[in-house]
Image (cartoon, grey):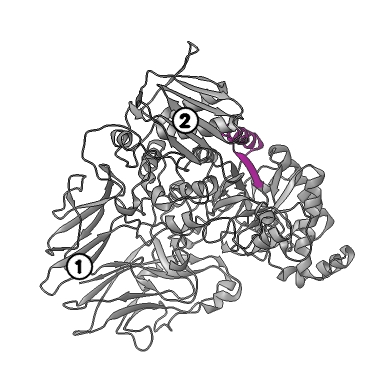
Amino acid sequence: MLGKTACIIALMVLAAGCTDQSVRDTGAEKDGVSGQHASAHPLSVIPLPEDIAYEAGKPFQVTNAWRIGGHNETVTAFKRIMENSPFDFQPDTTDTPEILFQLAETGLGYEGYKLEARDGKITVEADAAAGLYYGAVTLWQILTPLNGTEVVTLTPMTITDRPRFGWRGLMLDEGRHFQGEDFVKRMLDWMSLHKFNRFQWHLVDDQGWRLEIKKYPELTAKGAWRVPAGAASRANIDPETGEPKKIGGFYTQEQIRDIVAYAAERHIMIIPEIGLPGHSQAPTAVYPQFGMFDAPRAVSADWGIFKDTYNLEDHTFAYLEDVLREVMDLFPSPYVHIGGDEVQKDLWANDPRTQELMADKGIKDVEEIQSYFTRHFDGFLNEHGRTLIGWDEILEGGDIHQSSIVMSWRGEAGGIEAAKEGHEVIMSPWPMMYLDMHQSLSTREPTGRPDRTSLVPLKRLYDYDPVPNELTPDQVALIKGAQGNIWTEHMRTNDHVMHMTFPRASAIAETVWSRRDKDFDGFVGRLPAQLARYDSLGIRYADVAFEVQADIVELADGQRQITLSNQLAAGNIRYTLDGTEVTADSDLYTAPVVVDATDQLQASTFVDGRMLSAPTERGLDQISVRTRTDDQLAVCESGYHLKLDDDYPYTGPRAAFSLNILNPCWIYKDVNLEGIRTVDLTVGTIPFNFQIGDDWKKVTFDQPQTEHGELNIYANQCTGAPVVSVSLAPVQSSFGLVDLSAELPAGLAAEALCFRFARPAFDPAGGEEMLYTLDKVVLR
């Protein structure tokens, strides 16, 4: 339900034509969010408020002459929030501000608020400062419609709003890649503008320790730095040390305190995550006495699940308690997350000393070691007035304290089990709430996890509800909320983090704030204005949901038939065929178009005259329509489908390769070989830096015919005799991409081409190996 009263039709037409815009009058013809995705009301507010009641009365204009007053903290915050808008409201000096923020009893709880707009004034009331802040965020959105100006006309209304869940979170993984203080503060700003209130800070992992601990300085002096994987990185020598350059970083305790205070000003609680007993390669590499290996090691640049764990020695528990004391001193949060996920027990099971310690401590088997750690640190944290949170594996291996909070990530099963056992639960299931999953099949998607079965586009994420149907009302009450997780194994840059997070963060925000009967079509209608706000905030979001996909079919007469679409079936697609820039005045796409091979396509999605995606550009000549990138080729099945960075160049943009790391093999389906004699191939290499246990033994290659190996091309299937082989000798001596070429047999007829590499023995257990990978296929 969007309001207690219906739209007053005459007022709504006057106000905004019932589009997704705030009320205004531009007098221009616009592309709207068409079809089923038209918004049900004119306010482009995300997350959608609980209730919007439009009222009879005269519309009024908000201008820059308005003044703001009332609750000082909120006035200051609202000024800051409005910095990137057309408005520059000044504090009131007359005791009659047009915009008033005030504390009052609303009955809407700590984070709820009421916003009233009528008679040329706007009043925001709330029981607490947090509610006033969220009311200020809603007002910011009301005053920044798509293509907003310094004058906005509003219909009289009352908004009554409060969150559905108390835990509305995002997690940022800095253990894998260090983002830095400036970016974290920007992320906190952006979170607050989505009404998120929990920031889980993943500061420790196998690849790095990011938090200064005074008692153990080597954790950051050595544990925060690593040499990236790959031959190119090993060849990148630091002239000052004569050794390969390292990447990494960490936060001083002074920086941590500053960031915690910065978050609190935005009503965000930071929850530190210090993983144990697994995900501990970095700390135990520099302090081996706390782990299962005797000697210091380098911090790893591998991805995957490590066997490294903390040991059961008393001095290890003392070390972890020391760490947690300093952590609790830095973070006032009542919660501390200890991880507890993906703990490999092989080293414990095969270590005589561990067996002795298990007997001394009354641990009956290695499965119970996990819960021994959990129970110990749950008790330790409780003694210090804190509550333990852990991933759902903390349920394994025996009873844990009732106070422990379970974060369910392996689907919903762990959360359901925990709620049935009386534990509080935070829902964060893979893949829906994992933002390292790709959100489309676009070739513009950066590195990550592109497998079709685990794609998380906006609709799949939006449709997820954190409350499982099988829970009783008492068990439902234990669902604290939900959280999206930004795992950064494959996010090397902050731009990449933004692409994977936004606008999906808007979908999560609406899931955890708005009522359960929220509506995806309405969300899509409100999204264009949100993207415009992202632009003003400098958020480099993913536009792939609106990106135009072009399906091009070669016709018998040499012409092409083009079918255009976008993921959301929203907005209007406009296009040009003469190579000129596409604009809001270009031809409107309504049905498939037949064009000449000499044409050049540009197309984009528009709403209200605003371009919502970077233009799709396609040549329509024979070479262009028969070229395939690795994203457009099918990967062979059975394994791990990833999109991975090249390890070269050292800085700046890099090629990204889509491949199955256990079966590096690609298929060009529905190939048209008519008139084709040559195949040009762009090939690269990437390091095989994956901790996947014995699965590395499943990696398959063809048998090489030479010491350098070959790229084999097969017709119709990926076995038998290749139709042509191309030497890999040029690739072995190069970093980056290498171009190869081969002549195809005359008259070759095939429905598909398969590309497989042949190479000598592959044994990553004996040292870092590399994989050949295919970047592009061009048929000439």
Q: Could you tell me how far apart the alpha carbons at marks 1 and 2 are, in whole angstroms?
A: 50 Å
Q: Position of residue 359 (x, y in %)?
A: 88, 68
For marks 1 and 2, give the one nearer the viewer.
2
Specify the quadrant that holds the C terminus. bottom left
Residue 751 occupies quadrant: bottom left
- Residue 339 visible, this orientation: no
Q: Position of residue 106 (x, y in %)?
A: 59, 31
Q: Earlier in the sequence, mark 1 or mark 2?
A: 2
Q: Secondary structure at mark 1?
A: helix
Main secondary structure along the magenta-highlighted residues: helix
The number of numbered badges drawn on the structure is: 2
Relative to residue 528, is residue 254 depicted above or below?
above
Relative to residue 673, is residue 510 depicted above or below?
above
Residue 215 occupies quadrant: top right
Q: Is residue 594 one of those drawn in magenta?
A: no
**Disc 1 vs disc 2: Cβ atoms closer than 8 Å?**
no
Q: Position of residue 133 (x, y in %)?
A: 54, 31
- How crowded is the residue under tag 2: few (<14 C-alpha within 10 Å), some, or many (20+)? many
Specify the label residue 433 is tagged with. Answer: none
Identity, as a three-letter code, of the amino acid under mark 2 = Ile
- How crowded is the residue under tag 1: few (<14 C-alpha within 10 Å), some, or many (20+)? few
Residue depicted at x 31% and y 75% = 668
Residue depicted at x 11% and y 63% = 596
In the image: residue 660, left or right of residue 58: right
- Can you name the residue that lies furthest to the bottom here? 720
Q: Front-most of 274 and 650?
A: 274
Q: Secondary structure at mark 2?
A: helix
Range shown magenta: 252-272
Q: Front-most of 365 and 182?
A: 365
Q: Which residue is mark 1?
A: 623
Q: Position of residue 204 (x, y in %)?
A: 64, 51
Specify the label residue 81 is tagged with. Answer: 2
